[in-house]
Amino acid sequence: MRVSQLLNPTLREVPAEAEIISHQLMLRAGLIRKSAAGIYTYLPLGLRVLKKIETIVREEMDIKGGQEVLMPIVQPAELWQESGRWDVYGEEMFRLKDRHQREFCLGPTHEEIITDLVRGEVRSYKQLPLLLYQIQNKYRDERRPRFGLMRGREFIMKDLYSFDRDEAGLDISYKKMYDAYCRIFSRCGLAYRPVEADAGAIGGTGGTHEFMVLADSGENSVVYCPSCHYAANVEKAECQPQVIESADAEVPRQLVHTPGVKTIEEAAAFLKVPKTQLVKSLLYQGDDKVFLVLVRGDRELNEIKLNNALGGFVSLQLASPEVVQQLLSCGPGSVGPVEAPETLMVVADQEVALMENAVCGANKENYHLVGIMPKKEFRIDHVYDLRTIIPGEACSNCGTPLKEARGIEVGQVFKLGTKYSKALGATFLDENGIEKPCVMGCYGVGVSRTMAAAIEQNYDDLGITWPIPIAPYHCILVPISTKDAQVVETAERLYQELQNLGVEVILDDRDERAGVKFKDADLVGYPLRITIGSKTLANGQVELKERKGGETKLVPVEEAAARVKEIIKKALSF
Amino acid sequence: MRVSQLLNPTLREVPAEAEIISHQLMLRAGLIRKSAAGIYTYLPLGLRVLKKIETIVREEMDIKGGQEVLMPIVQPAELWQESGRWDVYGEEMFRLKDRHQREFCLGPTHEEIITDLVRGEVRSYKQLPLLLYQIQNKYRDERRPRFGLMRGREFIMKDLYSFDRDEAGLDISYKKMYDAYCRIFSRCGLAYRPVEADAGAIGGTGGTHEFMVLADSGENSVVYCPSCHYAANVEKAECQPQVIESADAEVPRQLVHTPGVKTIEEAAAFLKVPKTQLVKSLLYQGDDKVFLVLVRGDRELNEIKLNNALGGFVSLQLASPEVVQQLLSCGPGSVGPVEAPETLMVVADQEVALMENAVCGANKENYHLVGIMPKKEFRIDHVYDLRTIIPGEACSNCGTPLKEARGIEVGQVFKLGTKYSKALGATFLDENGIEKPCVMGCYGVGVSRTMAAAIEQNYDDLGITWPIPIAPYHCILVPISTKDAQVVETAERLYQELQNLGVEVILDDRDERAGVKFKDADLVGYPLRITIGSKTLANGQVELKERKGGETKLVPVEEAAARVKEIIKKALSF
């Protein structure tokens, strides 16, 4: 390709509309243009990057036995009503009607469509396992679309759905996809981590991992173990209970007047005890059920863990002061577990059960109880891991202190179980002729998001520093002058040589100053640049520069193409 | 690929929902499944065919300097309002609103989006010509979607848009695309014809050609010249005027009483003259303008030609009897050109001007005029080619009698001119710094439609007979038995050999009767089949069968792979 013939409108200024670096650089490097809020056109270089990611994803899906299909974007409401998600999905779903007033949506995901397909075609256990995938547009009507391709309204995903006979089969399919995803992001040249994650609203029975591209700008916080392979979303990471030996001998139970004391901080200060000695007591309402939740005074309750532990409420929130008053005859700041009503379920973090001489609210305004022994002096119905981990805590696997990183979620593997196959009737007959629902998994890669995440991880002051496997072209040739015959001729010869070697090469044949060409090359982020100038040519040399790291070498003209080929080959071998 | 692992649900029965052969066979061969009316899922083999067509299209676009982009499906209403098409498009356009009640459509085409992009990025004549294309879903809310992929509501198109400095540039871009389209359909292995076509509602200034895949089931009628290259849509084909020498000497003008005679047939019978001697006089209303249209009595008026000749009305139809009565004081069956009101424009087909001793209505109930000399005895304001050609008439290019064929439109190349660039302000500065609108062309290939058309042209009683370049796989291996070790081993060895030669091979490793395997292979339509059975193996042979034509040969096992490779190679060379 010749730059003179390429639609690659680069911008010197940072566009005001772009808040994050990947959005800024994609606009500046001429990779995308906005067509509407959260809706983009991919320009030629942007599309090349996208296609490279797609190709890697496709190859890895095929290796694992995935069969590519293509499902519709416009999906009939009936299927979503069958699964029960039509009314649940809310405003994020784009909905429309056809000329006959039938309702459709623009697919935010394809569980319904694929399950409908499979229920029509699969009859026997012999047809399973089945791994079907597509690379297709997805739609999500974000309230405030922004961040470019990181959070668009029209975006591209690979989604694979696995259908197995049983949980054991699902485990195998899940492992295949987990491994495939590791290969995908490695092949893209990205630093990433698979982390244990929360199952969330998609509603599955089993495990799930998110694949995070590590970047300081990432919106997700993850913890990982530097010793073993453990890593998890910070909301999901398992906590080891910390035991704090009580300094004092057993303190007698006592009701203490604590006028005006409402918060943990106030209580600790007033009673002169560390926060670790206090029990934080919170009255929660899950749908129409109320229960008391306890964590140690210095800890944060993790509502996601709480909701998972209790089986998943649609709505989970702190009970209102009115409800607290009605049930415990005090305000939220005075709640405590001692002598809580028999009908009130008490759920405690595992650390609470290990406390001694604890301090807690007395269910009486302006009073606290001290010298409380959990389990002895108050009831705990269930003990769970209910708090959010703090980096530096021990790895639940090997005990090493965990480190923290920030990541961008680019993929997720998910055990769905039988939720959709039961709802839509995707069943098969097993070896004994018994009808059973398929056991499903779903596995997504945000293809356009991966492109954005790659930039968030790979850029500098001058522009993008693409990993070679997903760069729009591998190498750019920059002749310093278009007037010097020897320079032009050498550039053209190298252009041919590199093409013959299968290197993706682009020639900046524009009649522009060298500075302009360098700036554009750095901005777009071609991994290798060969500069052809008359000075070095006098010694039979050209300059070979690596975009990342900026290493620059003079190499003999006749070796230049082979050197480039070698670097590319090494980067693409996996 | 092994058939045992492939999702390829074949059907023995013809599905009731499918009216046309391509739809029937795509369902029966397990290529597609319906997700909603006019909306389909492509199963693995169907998607393979689609991708092959896409690849051919992409390669030919790239050769001509096309740059691939990817534009959005969801398009903002504002752009369509700017071009004036939001209100014109009607019910065929899927429309929707986002959560903020902003209006969008699902793109039926992308002139607005691409013109918006180009107006933002193109400033100078140096950036032109620009050929931008995409392969993308398109949407059309058909009143009654049917015929499978032939007329879907969600379908796949390649659309390229050219931007040039002037009409001369457009001519070059148009020629490039015309040539590329010829190569595309040739490479797909299809019999096709480019035909001159009508510009229709898309509204351009220049020429247009449709590319027709020839098939008896085609909904379009085309005429073509067996001697030269002329071919045209029957509605568009140029007519040569036929001169009919009047047998009689000049007949004096005479008003003849013709009681109850209304039609051409009645007049010819009553007056005992051939229909060729009559003038058919029709009062037409184009928007709010009325005019008189004349064609020879034996000819059909072609309304498309009429509307094009007169500059394009939004609505064009026969004037109502009330309007006829008011203007000419007679019914529609008595209309004639003689002494027509001065204010009434008279438009005639070229043959009318050549008539002698003609008979026409007298603008008086129950009377005709005979012995009328056109132009002498009545005024003709404009002479055009206004009739529809009849196969067998002379080619307008070389005079050879034209033949007729039926075709399926799979592509169209179109000179748009400056309609969209003016409406949206996509301008550039020329060499002299003068601002000018880009001169545009648009060029579409119905990718999914081509797949359907290919089947309409290539099938027999047993199933599809794919052309090799777009077949889902080139060759299927059918071991007659899965119990015979030698048979299985030979099949596996050939499977490896063929893969090593780069042949797309599929192995029917199912434990099914040979008859079932043959039926499926014929139905899906793999171009080559190798049957491995113990009888022929005893002589060291396997059976090689060509699906199309059904030629069957016994070939030595060790030569089989090479023979297949040779046939494939020949079919793919272009």
Image (tube, coloured by chain):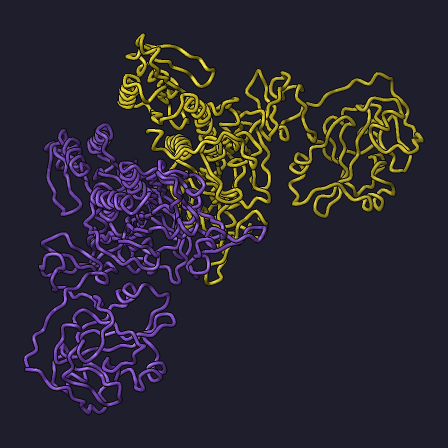
Chain colours: A purple, B yellow
Position in image of residue B266 (x %, y %): 86, 28
Between B173 and A414, the one nearer to me in the picture = A414
Position in image of residue A359 (x %, y %): 17, 82
Position in image of residue A407 (x %, y %): 22, 56
Position in image of residue B179 (x %, y %): 45, 27
Q: Is residue B279 visible?
A: yes
In the picture as drawn, the residue positioned furthest to the top comes out as B539
Between A535 and A286, the one nearer to me in the picture = A286
Q: Is residue B428 visible?
A: no
Query: Which residue does the image show at 66% across and 19% down from the upper left?
Result: B392
- Quadrant of the image for the C terminus of chain B? top left
In the picture as drawn, the residue positioned furthest to the front comes out as A432
Classify B147 as above or below A341.
above
Q: State which quadrant residue B346 falls in.
A: top right
Between A483 and B90, the one nearer to me in the picture = B90
Between A61 and B273, the one nearer to me in the picture = A61
User: Is B185 on the left-hand or right-hand side of A202?
Assistant: right
User: Is B293 on the left-hand or right-hand side of B99?
Assistant: right
User: Is A314 on the left-hand or right-hand side of A59?
Assistant: right
Query: Which residue does the image show at 24% across and 79% down from the upper left?
Result: A337
